[in-house]
């Protein structure tokens, strides 16, 4: 799915259509999926019509379809990036501005100044 230049509503519609097609290709009715996901049948129907459902119910539906491993592609583990293994740094706990950062933000210059 190419997400570049798409609005959030278009992305959401693509996802709901993919889930619907996956359910159908798995031979499940909306009621079957709802039973397996432990959600109300109306939740599945609402989602497939492109209406909002809770993130928790979305995850339940993905798990019921056996797609939970694909969630790692949605938000990858930041510690598994190649750059993480190359660098010899500890995982950041917080981000704090330094006085130098604050000074640079407060120093205003004309565009022709060096």
Image (spheres, rainbow, N blue to C red):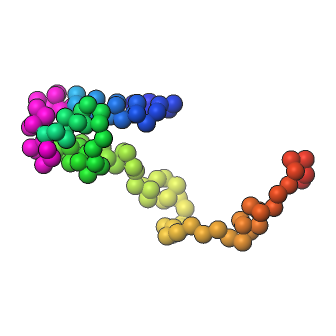
Asked if 69 appears above or below 7 in the picture, the reply is: below
Predominant secondary structure, magenta span:
helix
Q: Is residue 81 left or right of residue 102?
A: left
Q: Percent x, y for residue 45?
A: 19, 34
x 34%, y 31%: residue: 13
Mark count: 0
Q: Percent x, y for residue 52?
A: 30, 41
Q: Is residue 91 left or right of residue 59?
A: right
Q: Is residue 96 left or right of residue 73?
A: right
Asked if 97 appears above or below 24 in the picture, the reply is: below
x 47%, y 31%: residue: 6
Among the 4 quarters of the image, the one containing residue 25: top left
Q: Percent x, y for residue 100?
A: 74, 68
Taking the magenta stretch, the answer to whether it contains residue 31 is yes
Asked if 19 appears above or below 73 in the picture, the reply is: above
x 23%, y 43%: residue: 62
Asked if 73 appears above or below 12 in the picture, the reply is: below
| Pick the front one: 67 or 99 | 99
x 28%, y 29%: residue: 17
Bounds of the magenta span? Answer: 22-40
Image quarter in which the N terminus is found: top left
Q: Is residue 59 visible?
A: no
Q: Is residue 74 visible?
A: yes
Taking the magenta stretch, the answer to whether it contains residue 88 is no
| Pick the front one: 35 or 70 | 35
């Amino acid at each position: 799915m190419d997400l570049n230049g798409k609005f959030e509503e278009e992305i959401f519609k693509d996802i709901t259509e993919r889930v619907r097609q996956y359910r159908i290709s798995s031979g499940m009715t909306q009621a079957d999926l709802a039973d397996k996901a432990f959600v109300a049948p109306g939740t599945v129907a609402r989602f497939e019509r492109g209406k909002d459902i809770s993130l928790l119910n979305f995850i339940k539906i993905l798990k019921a379809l056996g797609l939970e491993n694909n969630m790692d592609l949605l938000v990858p583990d930041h510690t598994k990036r190649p750059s993480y293994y190359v660098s010899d740094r500890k995982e950041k706990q917080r981000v704090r501005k330094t006085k130098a950062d604050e000074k640079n933000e407060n120093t205003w210059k004309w565009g022709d100044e060096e």
